[in-house]
Structures are given as C-alpha cells and as structure tokens.
C-alpha cells in the first residue's frame, strides 16, 4: 500500500464512512471565493447586508446567477476564468427574489411581493442576462419559493409556499391561505404566462392537509416533478405535462442514535432521539425512479441527514446520524444546535461529472458540503468541503467539472465574514481540506472546536498538544495531535478537571509543558462572565493541582482580552512562564501590550512592553507566544477577516531582551523582528477567505513549526480549522 493510500484509508476510518477516494482518483478542491458584497450597486453602503441563497449557471457555464433576498436583487458572477471570478453586478427586482434558474440566456426569477403572510403574492420575472433587463413578468398568485426547469428547458415549476407566520399560534399549521404548485411552459427562455397551471395540493398530507407548505421542486427526465411539503412532512410526485398529482407519500421519521442532544458545551455523541420527522427541504432526482432529500426540518422535525426514496415512497437508503458524525470529526459540529437540528442539512445538488454521479449535501449550520458517490445502493462519502457560512444553494457545471455554493450569512456589520459564493473543481491531486481531523473514542466521534494554543509533546517529533477555548466551556480539553499524518489527527483528548469533574469557568488560550511533563494553562478571563484571569498547573491526568490568580497590580487594570498564550523560558529554579496579553489593558499606552512573566519557584511577577503594529481598522493584538532557541515567537494579528484582513504575522523577540520589570512601574520595551507573514498562505491554503483567528503556534520536538486557526466553534464562523507546518527560512 502506498503512503498516500494509507492516508486515505486512515481518514476514511476517522470519518466513519465507507472510504475516501483512492489517491489516484480525482478530488474536489475549492479554487476560488467570491464576496457577494462585491456586487453591491454603486452608492450602497459597503456594509449593506447581502446574501447568496439559490444559485444557477447559464447554459454556457460562464456566468453564475444567485438570489439575494436582503438586497432584493439577483447577482451575476463572471466565471470565464474560474480561478478569478469577477463581479457582474446586481439587478434590483422590486421584491424579494427567492429562487432563480436559467435557460437560453435568460434568468427566471421567483420574486416574493407579499404584503403580509395572510396576503401572499409573487411574480415570475424573466431577465435577459446579457442586458440585465427584466423582459417580462407573470403573476403567480402567491408567495413563491423554489423554481426548477425540466431537462430540455421547455417546462418549469415553482413551489408556491405561502409560508406560515412563526409568530402566529406559535407557528403551528394550518395557517391559510394554502400553498400550491405552478407549472408553466418555456420556449427559448421565454415564459408564456397564459400557460401557467396551478396544481392543487390540499388533502394529500397526513399533517395539516388543508395547508400544504410546498418547499422545493425537481424534475426527472420523464417530466415528473418531485415536490417537498416540508412542514407537512410529505413528498408529492406530479406529472408536469398534465399538471396532475401522480402520487404522494409521507417522508416518515427516523430514530437517531450516537448524536449530541444537549446544548451544554460538551461534545458527547452518545445520545438518542426517537421518531424524528424528516421534514425534507431540498429534493433532487438521482434518476427517473430514485430521489434524494435533505432532511433539514423546519417545524417539528429534522433528522440531521438525507434519505433516498423510490418514487413510490420506499426508503432505499437512510443516512441516519452518519453524516453528522463525520462532520463532527472535522471540527464543524455546531454545539448550539445539539438540542435542535444538529448540522441541519438543507441544500442539495446532484450532477454527473466524468461519468460519475455525485450527491452534494449542504449542511447549513455546519457550513460544509458532503460529497457522496451515488453507487446505486448505499452512497459513499468521499469528502467534506468547507463552504463559507451557511451554504444554502449549489449548482454544478458538469462539463467544466465545477461546483458552486451560495453561502447566505452576512456578518459584515458585526465585523465577521461576508456572504460568499465558492467554487470547487474536480481534478487530480490531494484533498486540501480537512487539514486536521479527530479519531474516534469508544466508537463515537470526539469532535473538536476552537483550537487556541499549541505546544510540543516532549521528545516526540511530529506530536503536539492543543487546547480548546471557552466555546466548549463545559469541556475544557487538551488534545494530542499527530502532525505526521495528512490530514493531522487528534489521537487523544484529556479533559481538564477540578475535583474530579470537568473544570468550570475556564477560557484556555495557551498551553506549555514543563520538565515534569505537567501542563501550564493560561486562561483568558472575563469578569462579566465571572471567569478569572489565571494560570493553572495541571498534571498528566488533567487534574488542576495549582491555580494561580493574577496579582492585584495586573487585575486592577484588567479587561477581558487577557492571556492568549503561555511558554516556558529557562530551566530549573530559573524556569519562567511568559504570557502574551492580547490587547492593551487600562494602564497600557495605546499601541503597547504586556508580555507578563511569572516564576513558579520564586512566585515573582514581572512584565515588559511589546509594541504593536498599527491598523487602519479593527484592532491589533497578540494570539500566541512560543519559546524556541534564543527567541520567543509571537503571533500578532488584526481581528479582520476576508479582504479586510491585513495583519497576520509572526514576530520574534530575543530571550536576552526579556528583562522583566516589577509590575506597577515603568516597563522596558522589547524589540521585535518579523519572522513570517501568514497572510499569503492563509489566502492560498484552501482558496477561501482569510480567517481572522490565527491563534496557535509552536515548534515540535524536532524544531518544526506549526500553526492553527481557531474556528470559534462554528458560531458565526465558517467552522474551518487550518492546521499547517510553517516554513521559517533561517530559523534555528
């Protein structure tokens, strides 16, 4: 067995799926990322909320078109150069575009114009892509959701949802008026409004039959339409030519085992849920007899996976918890959704590329795409791709071997990532993502999140320790990483305990290992949450044996941005802990932060001042400190993400320059030397946007440096964790 194929088998085992593709098989990798805000019309506030939701491609595969509900527009992206997508502008739709498809140089856009939930209305707009002008509109008689065309683009269908009001009767259905399905004729991209037929859907579902809630439509090659009624937990098959219902069946329910069911800051995949309604969102035909649904749930269900049915309603495959468990092992599990719908599969795409049919499953809350091979029987999970924040829609361009995802969440006003469209291509090579995964323990996923500090495992090259911060506040954890594998593997986890129980009130941001093999942990405090700024001495069993509070000279001026790293300089009685304080505290001059020292033997505290780089926006602070050779290495970064990110650097300070003065007095200023600029590799790592939280850096026992990003526990973030070796030319 080759080295590459061994890696493949290992990763497959970790993800508890059939197998990743053999090394010689092509893989999908992200090749480009497009920020939707680039399409904001002139004069709009640059921080105006945008969103890419449903996405389509023109017939020539050179232009992507997406619906942008917050902006009230559709956006265009020129992908003639697939590695450098260009803004094509936006077209305001005088309403809320909910879905879009394309045919013969036209964009067909479903637009919600409802006055209220009880007075729904909408129209179909036909847009010339070249001129970006609306050529015609058709009244739809209700609030539209999904739109689809048949294979030869002569027939179309729109789900008229007439969505429920979640603030009325606690969102319970029925809520009138009832939704239905619109079917219409298309010729060369033009729509004959007079051909519109309404398909009545009342009286079909076992749940609120008088109030069908149509969600998603899909055509097979026989002009049969599969339609999901999400809240009704029903799937309907319609003959498009006659606009008649051919059959319908309940989507049914699933018993789930081996899942995390509690939002408690602890990743425990041992829970069970019984009889969970599937409540599918997206539906796609796999062939003329099989269809696949993404079981998001939006009412009382959501079984966290996907199901393959035949068109009579027979279950041919049920994923159960397998997808969610695989996602957890890549660090993308959203603990805040444990009590609800977990990773929340919502979107789907099915495409045949190079003769192989693929299923692309989009997990809204985990911000990933599961790539499955359709085998005709049990699908095979091939990859998990990172996809911005909250992927909503996807489209494949098979002849270009492309997949595009539309990611709906825009956090620009909060300083977070913007909405993005992301491009992936099938090709030869290795998977660029994930860069780190977790092994299982006792047959269950371990999961991980928010890796915030690194340290070497003594005398074991290629082995590192990492810590998770307060995102998992109920499960403070020390991870052991085997960095010799690709992707790197979290092989062991150690819970930090106090009195035999997982320790409370910790926000671990830094880790160091002393001569005895014990851990020093730096916890970043937050007085508002009663979390103390402190150092913790922890034995190899994870038991806190010593808790060291900060002296009054420091605490008197504290803010919540405290220790972000800890390292050890010297040995024996001279061994001194050095901690990097992230931002200026109340007694610091602007542009200077403290490097704080503590000698465990003498109990003496001290500090020096560290000069920060300047930034035109956001703030600049420290994220890590690691001693190696005659220097300490410090990560200095801004808190900006994407195109706004400008500073992600590694500096070194000579240990001989670390001459701490007493706290409360004048502190000496150290000299820093730039050792590495991470910005280019953060951009190129997986061709996504630049992540803000580069938070861990350390040298292994052989002196090889590594870095890691903090994924914020998939909370208002993409959930991506980048873990990579760093090329420090000339570093001792």
Image (spheres, grey):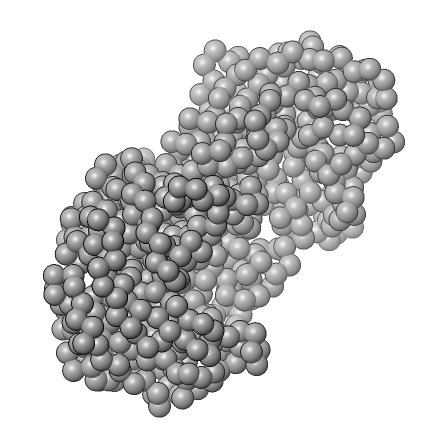
The image quarter containing residue 576 is: top right
Q: Quadrant of residue 488?
A: top left
x 60%, y 63%: residue: 262
Q: Residue at x 58, y 58 (%)?
A: 336
Q: Nearer the viewer, residue 184 or 654?
A: 184
Q: Position of residue 590 (x, y in %)?
A: 71, 23
Give the side of residue 581 with respect to residue 179, left or right: right
Using the image, determine if residue 218 lies above or below residue 336: below
Residue at the extreme top of the image, as rendered: 656
Seen at 48% across and 11% down, the residue is 730
Residue drawn at x 68%, y 22% as measured from the top left: 591
Q: Is residue 40 visible?
A: yes
Residue 477 is situated, as x and y percent measured from the top left of the image, at: 63, 45
Report the front residue among 95 and 675: 95
Locate residue 188, reporting x and y percent. Answer: 12, 61
Regarding residue 311, the answer to whether it shows in the image is: no
């Amino acid at each position: 067995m080759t080295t590459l194929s061994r890696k493949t088998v290992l990763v497959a085992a970790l993800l508890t799926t059939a197998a990743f593709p053999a090394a010689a098989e092509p893989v999908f990798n992200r090749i480009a990322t497009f920020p939707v805000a680039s399409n904001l019309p002139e004069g709009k506030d640059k921080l105006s909320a945008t969103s890419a939701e449903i996405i389509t491609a023109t017939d020539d595969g050179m232009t992507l078109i997406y619906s942008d509900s917050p902006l009230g527009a559709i956006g265009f992206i020129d992908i003639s150069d697939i590695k450098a997508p260009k803004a094509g502008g936006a077209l305001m739709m005088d309403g809320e575009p909910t879905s879009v498809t394309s045919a013969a140089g036209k964009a067909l856009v479903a637009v919600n114009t409802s006055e209220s939930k009880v007075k729904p209305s909408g129209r179909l707009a036909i847009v010339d892509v070249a001129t970006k002008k609306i050529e015609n509109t058709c009244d739809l008689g209700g609030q539209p959701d999904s739109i689809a065309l048949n294979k030869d683009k002569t027939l179309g269908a729109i789900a008229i949802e007439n969505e429920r009001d979640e603030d009325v009767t606690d969102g319970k259905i029925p809520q009138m008026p009832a939704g239905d399905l619109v079917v219409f004729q298309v010729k060369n991209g033009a729509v004959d409004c007079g051909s519109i037929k309404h398909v009545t859907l009342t009286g079909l579902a076992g749940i609120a039959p008088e109030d069908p809630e149509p969600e998603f439509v899909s055509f097979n090659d026989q002009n049969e339409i599969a339609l999901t009624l999400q809240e009704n937990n029903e799937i309907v098959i319609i003959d498009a030519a006659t606009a008649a219902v051919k059959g319908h069946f309940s989507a049914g329910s699933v018993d789930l085992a081996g899942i995390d069911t509690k939002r408690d800051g602890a990743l425990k995949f041992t829970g069970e849920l019984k009889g969970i309604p599937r409540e599918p969102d997206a539906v796609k035909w796999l062939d003329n007899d099989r269809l696949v649904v993404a079981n998001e749930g939006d009412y009382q269900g959501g079984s966290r996976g996907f199901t393959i049915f035949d068109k009579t309603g027979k279950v041919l495959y049920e994923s159960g918890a397998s997808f969610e468990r695989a996602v957890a092992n890549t660090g993308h599990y959203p603990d805040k959704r444990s009590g609800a719908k977990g990773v929340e599969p919502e979107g789907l795409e099915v495409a045949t590329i190079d003769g192989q049919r693929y299923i692309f499953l989009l997990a809204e809350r985990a911000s990933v795409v599961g790539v499955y091979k359709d085998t005709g029987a049990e699908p095979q999970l091939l990859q998990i791709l990172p996809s911005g924040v909250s992927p909503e829609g996807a489209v494949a361009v098979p002849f270009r071997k492309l997949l595009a995802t539309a990611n709906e969440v825009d956090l620009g006003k909060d300083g977070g990532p913007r909405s993005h469209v992301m491009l992936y291509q099938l090709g030869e090579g290795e998977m660029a993502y994930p860069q780190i995964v977790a092994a299982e323990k006792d047959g269950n996923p371990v999961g991980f999140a928010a890796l915030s500090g690194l340290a070497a495992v003594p005398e074991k090259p290629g082995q590192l320790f990492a810590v998770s911060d307060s995102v998992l506040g109920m499960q403070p954890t020390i991870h052991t990483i085997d960095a010799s594998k690709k992707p790197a593997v979290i092989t062991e986890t150690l819970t930090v305990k106090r009195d035999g129980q997982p320790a409370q009130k910790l926000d671990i941001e830094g880790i160091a290992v002393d001569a005895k093999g014990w851990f020093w942990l730096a916890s970043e405090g937050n007085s508002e949450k009663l979390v103390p700024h402190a150092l913790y001495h922890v034995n190899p069993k994870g038991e806190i044996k010593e808790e060291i509070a900060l002296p009054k000279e420091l605490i008197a001026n504290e803010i919540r941005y405290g220790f972000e790293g800890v390292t050890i300089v010297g040995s024996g009685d001279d061994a001194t802990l050095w901690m990097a304080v992230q931002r200026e505290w109340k007694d610091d001059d602007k542009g200077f932060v403290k490097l704080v020292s503590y000698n465990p033997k003498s109990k003496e505290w001290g500090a020096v001042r560290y000069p920060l780089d300047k930034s035109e926006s956001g703030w600049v602070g420290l994220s890590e400190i690691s001693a190696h050779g005659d220097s300490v290495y410090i990560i200095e970064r801004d808190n900006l993400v994407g195109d706004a990110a400008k500073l992600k650097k590694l500096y070194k300070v000579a240990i001989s320059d670390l001459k701490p003065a007493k706290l409360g007095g004048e502190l000496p200023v150290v000299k820093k030397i730039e050792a590495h600029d991470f910005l280019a590799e953060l951009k190129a790592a997986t061709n996504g946007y630049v992540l803000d939280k580069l938070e861990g850096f350390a040298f292994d026992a052989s002196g090889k440096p590594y870095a890691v990003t903090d994924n914020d526990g998939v909370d208002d973030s993409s959930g991506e964790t980048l873990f990579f070796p760093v090329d420090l030319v000339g570093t001792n």
